[in-house]
Image (cartoon, helix red, strand yellow):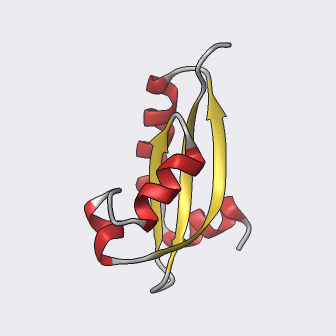
Amino acid sequence: MEKKYYTYILLIENNSLYCGYTDDVEKRFNAHLKGKGAKYTRAHKPIKIVYVKEFDTKSEAMKEEYRIKHLSRKEKLSLINL
């Protein structure tokens, strides 16, 4: 089985959005919940995963993360249909 990579967006308790990439979305989300994810999610508790997109390579997932992080909040909300 070939490894897949994912770009994801989390809804945070203060209604902000956090974007990242991983090879295991559930494991990464649980790490965020336990305060072992990113610095931002240690300080701001994630509520749920609101967007996931699958890629064949880590590079593609990282490029999508970069693209999403440069979108406006309105564009991100449109992307995840909130």
Q: Residue furthest top?
A: 1
Q: Determine whether 43 is above or below 57 in the image.
A: below
Q: Give the image quarter of residue 81.
A: bottom right
Q: Determine whether 45 is above or below 51 in the image.
A: below
Q: Determine whether 6 is above or below 18 in the image.
A: above
Q: Residue furthest right?
A: 81
Residue 68 placed where, x, y %? 49, 51
Please give the name of the residue rendered at 30% of the width and 70% of the height, measured from the top-left corner.
42
Residue 38 placed where, x, y %? 31, 58
> Which quadrant holds the N terminus?
top right
Residue 54 placed where, x, y %? 65, 35
Residue 37 placed where, x, y %? 35, 56
Please give the name of the residue rendered at 57% of the width and 63% of the height, measured from the top-left corner.
76
Q: Give the image quarter of residue 50.
A: bottom right
Q: How many marks?
A: 0
Please give the name of the residue rendered at 52% of the width and 34% of the height, measured from the top-left corner.
23
Lateral position of residue 59 relative to residue 6, left or right? left
> Which quadrant holds the C terminus?
bottom right
Please give the name of the residue rendered at 55% of the width and 58% of the height, measured from the top-left corner.
9
Q: Residue furthest front?
A: 34
Q: Residue furthest bottom?
A: 14
Q: Determine whether 23 is above or below 32 in the image.
A: above
